[in-house]
């Protein structure tokens, strides 16, 4: 089997040493192929060795300045360093070269979430969900982006889809509670969802605070 593919398999299994061995062999056999350098960089990123990873990514781009995977990995490197502006720039370069992917759209969306640019995050997160309907975390983040935009009805629909796919998603239940207070002023339903979040995660601070707020509103309304 191809050394790069073997290395990826080992990395997915969590066997970093074996992955490094195979990617090293791939680079030695094909020193002018950018793929091996990108894969080696991904291993280094996974263990937090960002400086060394950047050296491998620079080498990959010296070999092939159209290596979309290198820009994607560079984006991940900057994202892990919380340099979200730089990460977005790299992900945009990867997207411009192609191919488009669910992960790439998601990471671009999350860059803008972290930069507080919700209006920019929304289309990328929406596209991520369109590309992979089964990506629960992308759908959850898309729902949050909708809620931040005040589109509560659609946010509720997306969150309901999340909890159907993942019945243990405490954050989705919590945000459903928030959405039902904000959009429907439905304190009873909000309490139900806050309690679901607390049943799953008893130390869920936000859900606990949400429950206190809902109880206070219920008392004020004489319910």
Image (cartoon, rainbow, N blue to C red):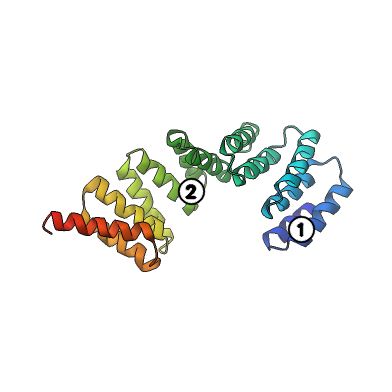
> CA gap, disc 2 to disc 1?
28 Å
Which quadrant is the C terminus positioned in?
bottom left
Q: Which residue is mark 1?
A: 19
Q: Position of residue 145 (x, y in %)?
A: 41, 42
In the displayed image of the protein, which residue is found farthest to the left? Answer: 222
**Percent position of residue 7, x then y:** 76, 56
Asked where in the image residue 215 lies, by quadrant, the reply is: bottom left
**Crowd around label 1: few <14 · some 14–19 · many ≥20 (10 Å):** many
Q: Residue, x 83% and y 50% (percent of image)? A: 26
Query: Residue at 69% of width from left, 41% of height from top?
Result: 69
- For marks 2 and 1 on the same chain, the one whose residue lies earlier in the sequence: 1
Left or right placement of residue 80 versus residue 119 in this view? right
User: For residue 31, which numbered disc appears in the image?
Assistant: none
Badge 2, how many Cα within 10 Å: few under 14, some, many 20+? many
For the N terminus, the quadrant is: bottom right
Image location of residue 128, percent across then percent down: 51, 43
Residue 113 visible in image: yes
Q: Residue furthest right?
A: 29
Image-quadrant location for residue 198? bottom left
The front one of 171 and 63 is 171
Left or right relative to 164: residue 22: right
As drawn, is 153 to the left or to the right of 73? left
- What residue lies at 45% left-to-right and 41% top-to-bottom? 126
Q: Position of residue 133 (x, y in %)?
A: 48, 49
**Residue wearing tag 2:** 138
Query: Above or below — where is 127 with respect to 137?
Result: above
Q: Residue at x 77, y 43 (%)?
A: 56
Q: Does dot 1 land on a helix, a strand or a loop?
A: helix
Q: Viewer-proximal residue, 13 or 220?
A: 220
As drawn, 14 above or below 55: below
Left or right of 173? Residue 93 is right
């Amino acid at each position: 089997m191809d050394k790069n593919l073997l290395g990826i398999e080992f990395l997915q299994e969590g066997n970093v040493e074996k992955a490094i061995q195979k990617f090293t062999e791939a680079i030695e056999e094909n020193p002018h192929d950018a793929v091996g350098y990108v894969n080696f960089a991904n291993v280094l990123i996974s263990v937090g060795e960002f400086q060394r990873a950047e050296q491998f990514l620079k080498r990959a781009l010296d070999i092939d300045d159209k290596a979309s995977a290198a820009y994607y990995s560079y984006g991940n490197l900057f994202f892990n360093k919380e340099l979200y502006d730089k990460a977005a720039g790299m992900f945009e370069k990867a997207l411009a070269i192609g191919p488009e992917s669910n992960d790439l759209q998601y990471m671009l969306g999350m860059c803008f979430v972290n930069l507080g640019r919700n209006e920019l995050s929304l289309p990328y997160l929406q596209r991520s969900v369109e590309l992979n309907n089964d990506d629960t975390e992308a759908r959850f983040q898309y729902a949050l982006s909708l809620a931040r935009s005040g589109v509560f009805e659609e946010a509720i629909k997306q969150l309901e889809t999340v909890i159907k796919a993942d019945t243990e998603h405490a954050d989705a239940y919590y945000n459903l509670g928030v959405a039902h207070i904000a959009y429907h002023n439905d304190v009873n339903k909000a309490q139900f969802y806050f309690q679901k979040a607390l049943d799953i995660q008893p130390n869920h601070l936000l859900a606990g605070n949400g429950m206190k707020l809902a109880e206070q509103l219920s008392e004020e309304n004489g319910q």
